[in-house]
Image: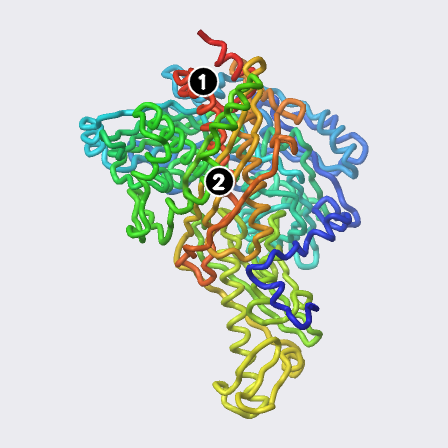
Amino acid sequence: MTTETNPMRFGSGQAVRRLEDEKLLEGGGRYTDDFSLPGQAWLCFVRSPYPHARVGSIDTSAAAAMPGVLGIYTGADLNAANVKPMPGAAGFKRADGSDCATPPRHVLALDTVRFVGEPVAMVIAGSMAQARDAAEAVLIDYESLPMVVDLPGAIADDAPQVWAPATGNIAAEMRHGNAEATAAAFAKAAHVVALDFVNQRVVALTIEPRTVLADFDTASERITIRMSTQMPSGVRDSVCAAIGLAKEKVRVVVGDVGGGFGMKTGAYPEDIAVAYAARALQRPVKWVADRSEEFLSSSHGRDIEARAELALDDQGKILGLRIRTHANVGAYATGTGVAIQLLIGPWVQTSVYDIQTIDFHFKAVLSHTAPTGAYRGAGRPEAIYTIERLMDEAARQTGIDRIELRRRNFISPAQMPYKNPMQQVYDTGAFESVMDQALALADWHGFDARAAESKKAGRLRGLGIATFLEWTGGNVFEERVTVAVRPDGIIEVFSAVNAMGQGIATTLAQLVVDAFGVPIEQVQIVLGDTDRGDGFGSAGSRSLFTGGSAVRVGAERTIDKGRELAAAELEVAAEDIQYAAGVFKVAGTDLKLDLFTLAGKQPEGQIFVDSTSTVSGPTWPNGCHIAEVEVDPPTGEISVLTYASVNDVGRVVNPLIVRGQLEGGAVQGIGQALCERVVYDTETGQPLTGSLMDYAAPRADILATMFRMEMDESTPCKNNPLGVKGVGELGTIGATPAVVNAVADALARNGMAARTPHLDMPLTADRMWKLMAAD
């Protein structure tokens, strides 16, 4: 059957291959570094080799005299030009009620550097090689200052202070719940389970590093920035605020993006520096981060240490949850970094369990490390790891089967809509049903036979589970689209959500097919251009449920406008006009008018609709993820043998893309569980994992078998017209606790239950060997 006779084979629910892939696989992708402009210069940053130092004199004379050098700028130069610091964490408070305390983060360090890799100066030259050579010739006099890079050191009484107003290195803190009621719950509990957690620092590790190409047009005095980002409008606004420009003076354009994972949300100091340099020199300027720069200065993720306690009655019903967390937010407390740990993570901390009595105390701690920010899951992985590790440990200590323990504490469908103790409302969810489906998919009850086979081979087999939900939305629920129906047979839709490898253009095109009933070849999705429209962008797994819903609404409004135009053209009432498959027809007659012909009859030569719409709230995707592992006692090596999951992501528009997102996310979560970790030397403050020679990223062979990822569409979301729920981060959130719980299960089944509370990620072979060999 041809596309023309059945366009809906490319509509929602169909496993349409990504429209983007053919171009990318054939090398036709256009990333920022693929673009060059006449007269383009290259920028190189001079970065601090010290974790904490006072910046003295900066001698640029030798560098300025080198071949090809066009300009050198320091923090003092930008300060004199009134370039403003990056915004901090507005709205958050310290315990005494004062505002969040964080040092001002200048685009280029002004008086003090606070982490290795902080930019201090920038050199612009005619070639990359010339810029790098000149950068090495810039002489900076540093006065080394006391530093601290780890959480225990940062909160110690005698810790070096990152910023004097942030006494104790506490930038901000929040308390949630009722401490007295929680204490009373613990006092009457039959069982109290406590664990200490380390959720280690990780890097996002996008294949494409951050890249910025800025051009200044002298006639319009306008800057055009081409870059790799998830949020073009946000970057534009930040550049304008820092340099002092009206929004119409800056345009941000985004092409293909080689991965974002949250790390490419918002503006970095480097983005503003490149824009400033282009304007100052009145010529194009490009900066491409190398891999080491990304390890040093891109936003890191996670990095928390927590003490969590669970109170249960004698039947295993949870009575209360108490958590104390310190989050290392780095040298500068960003709004994103603080919100993720003090607010967003706590929103899902009680997860799928009916827990109303909580006592949470979360602190954002400054240290001489790179600032933390969004990384796939952004606070939810940390929260879910905590509660899921507690649930399995509670099962071991109480003797209640871990599946039964979960059943006794699940929120039931009858309780929906359900308000958790953080005042977040879950609209739908059938958590027990999802778990039952996953247990069957993973052959949970056949595990003992498989474990016996592993034991014969001298290996320890374990089975891990995570039942959980997450919040999605980025906390911005409005989105804008424009729809243009052209006489050449193309429907062009612009959206401010952004592609970053997740296939969103294909999914949006499928929604256009749903609405207009035309072949997908007649749909053109345009993304990534602030001149075409504003919007929040892609973050927090919001691209489909906000951006897709906006496409649905915009398409319906376009058809309604077309109906009115067709009625006028055919001289009938609009209510007599029916629309289907690209044709307007007068009901009960043979009179009809093609959609694209109608577009050509308009004075503008098209039917155009600019549509802004809002969804009514976040989505709460949830799932049950089950991992099966083997541990090799002589080496400590862990192998993930199988990974099965059932996921409630509401209505599924493209199951092929959804599975890809779940699998990719799970690999990142498994990477954190088994191998990834950013390490700073506590004596020198130097990063020890500054390249892929040192940082253990997950590889394609991290799994011994394929994933089995299925979806349950029985509870569509009620907060958006599509019924969809976010999916981009779900795999990452579930994978880490599922794998670590599987390893804990392997130890407990083999006489090492006392060691399970001491499992600290990453579970590398040497760590596992030492743990199992300990007396």
Disc count in the image? 2
Q: Secondary structure at mark 1?
A: loop
The residue closer to the viewer here, 520 or 50, is 520
Q: Secondary structure at mark 2?
A: loop
Q: How is the image coloured?
A: rainbow
Location of residue 26 with respect to 345 vertically, above or below? below
The amino acid pointed to by label 2 is Gly
**Residue at the disc numbered 1:** 750
Give the position of the N terminus as an image quadrant: bottom right
Q: Quadrant of residue 313?
A: top left
Query: Would you say residue 402 is visible in this rendering?
Result: yes
What residue do we see at 68% from left, 76% from top? Answer: 487
Location of residue 773 with respect to 393 vertically, above or below? above
The residue closer to the viewer here, 98 or 578, is 578
Question: In the figure, is residue 385 to the left or right of 515?
Answer: left
Give the position of the C terminus as an image quadrant: top left
Residue 472, x across and y down, in percent: 45, 48
Question: In the figure, is residue 481 to the left or right of 444?
Answer: right
* Disc 1 to disc 2, C-alpha distance: 33 Å
Location of residue 423 with respect to 324 vertically, above or below? below
Query: Would you say residue 113 is visible in this rendering?
Result: no
Residue 50, x across and y down, in percent: 58, 21
Judged by depth in the image, the label closer to the viewer, 1 or 2, is: 1
The residue closer to the viewer here, 710 or 218, is 710
The residue closer to the viewer here, 85 or 486, is 486
The amino acid pointed to by label 1 is Asn
What residue do we see at 38% from left, 22% from top? Answer: 196
Residue 646, x across and y down, in percent: 48, 45
- Residue 377's tag is 2
Choose the circle earlier in sequence order: 1 or 2. Answer: 2
Residue 114, x across and y down, in percent: 52, 26
